Amino acid sequence: NFDILISYLGLEHLFSKTVASLSGGQKQRLNVALALVGDPKVVILDEPTAGLDPQTRRQIHDLIKQLKKEGKTIIVTTHYLEEAEKLCDKVAIIDNGKVIACGSPRELISKFDAQSRIEFIYSGDPKDIEQLRGVVKVVSEGDTYICWSSNVEITLQSLFSLLESKDSVVRQIIINSPTLEDLFLQLTGRHLRD
């Protein structure tokens, strides 16, 4: 029901306003509502959460999940790869107008062996970090290091051996499983761009 959708998206108080007078977030929510007029079987959403606050973004995510449960096909274009990873059953990564990878988020990450990220603070010699086993790439900013590892267990064993031999200390180890964003960067070699 359209009235329920308008209420859900918080648009009921905007009926007297022109579209030109709406804020960016209000226009985004209106676009989502208009995409659903007529109860379509296929819904195409272009950047549906761009410019939205976290609460409204979560509402749109919940709406997309509900539409999926109702059996609708949802096509979403987004630069928010964490959003695609959370919401989509199938993802196509497009670079320079060409599909370079396609599949479920988990299939893509495992198929292309996306690396895990290990982030930590180390005050020893930076050259030691580059020698850790399993490390594919290292980025540092001061004494904070981010390592991309093809095998987290081997890299951590190597790091702990280094600490023992150098009598050094590591603080604040954060291990992140590979994400679609990591995969995108790995496949394209470039940061996300418009």
Image: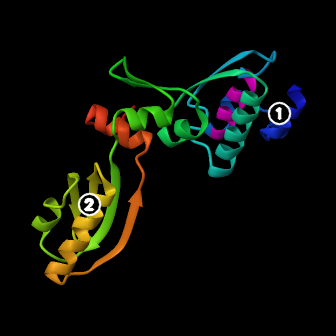
Position of residue 147 measured from the top left corner of the image (x, y, whole percent): 26, 57
Residue depicted at 28% across the width and 52% down the height: 148
Quadrant containing the N terminus is top right
> According to the image, label 2 marks what residue?
155
**Which quadrant would residue 126 be assigned to in this image?**
bottom left
In the image, is residue 14 part of the stretch drawn in magenta?
no
Position of residue 32 measured from the top left corner of the image (x, y, whole percent): 70, 28
- Dot 1 crowding, Cα within 10 Å, few <14, some 14–19, many 20+: some
Secondary element at image label 2:
helix
Q: Which of 67 and 18 is in front in this view?
A: 67
Give the mark nearer the N terminus: 1 vs 2.
1
Q: Is residue 127 visible?
A: yes
Residue type, mark 2 in image: Thr
Give me the disc on residue 95. Answer: none
Residue depicted at 46% across the width and 32% down the height: 107
Estimate the spatial distance between the alpha carbons at disc 1 and disc 2, rounded to whole Å.
51 Å
Vertical placement of residue 51 versus 165, above or below: above
Highlighted range, magenta: 25-34
Residue type, mark 1 in image: Ile
Q: In this view, does 153 lie to the left or right of 73?
A: left
**Which quadrant would residue 125 be assigned to in this image?**
bottom left
> According to the image, label 1 marks what residue?
6
Tell me which secondary structure the magenta stretch mostly adopts: helix
Position of residue 185 measured from the top left corner of the image (x, y, whole percent): 32, 39
In the image, is residue 29 part of the stretch drawn in magenta?
yes
